[in-house]
Amino acid sequence: MLRVKILASTIPLLLAGVVAGGELVPGASPCIALGRASMQIATGPWQNPLHVSFTDDPEVATVRVQVVDNADMADFAVIDGLQTAETDSCTVSRHTTFVSIVDHASTSDPVIYLSQESGADYRIFVQSRTFSPRDAAALVVSAGHNVRLAERSM
């Protein structure tokens, strides 16, 4: 009888977690390795992520990202299906930084203009089933933004 009560009390908690944006079984989230650290797209609000937003107006953007058609032209390329020696480089650890794509970022957060126009701050190439160009742009811009903030504090 005690087992049934315990089971009955956990079901509402699981449902509340799913409704709040969590997942019962976490899937692969877009991630990039940065040495021992990594950056990953946040899947839950409890991960205290960095925030980025996107705009369709190049005048509002603080960072421009160009989507290119050739991996050789890109500063950052994501291509599914390549086997690397660092297959577990994006496991979540204390060195993982999470990035969240929001509708409206604060004034200190990057606002990204994603296009195919030249003259961008970053160039990305994405051929992936798990990464969208927005995911790749959010991670690359956040990694660059994080480095600039670290350099300022030195």
Image: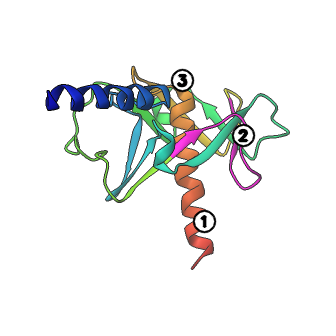
Residue at 77% x, 52% y: name it.
Answer: 107
Is 151 in front, or is 6? Answer: 6
Q: Where is residue 105 in the image (x, y as percent from the top left)?
A: 71, 44
Q: Does the magenta stretch include residue 67?
A: no
* Residue that mark 1 sits on: 149
Q: Give the range drawn in magenta.
A: 99-114
Whole-Å distance between the Cαs marked 2 and 3? 15 Å
Residue 61 sits in quarter = top right
Q: In this view, does 153 lie to the left or right of 26?
A: right
Which of labels 3 and 1 is toward the front? 1
* Residue that mark 2 sits on: 119
Residue at 27% x, 47% y: name it.
Answer: 89
Residue at 42% x, 32% y: name it.
Answer: 17
Specify the amino acid type for callout 2. Gly
Q: Position of residue 25 (x, y in %)?
A: 29, 28
* Residue that mark 3 sits on: 69
Whichever of labels 3 and 1 marks the residue nearer the N terminus, that label is: 3
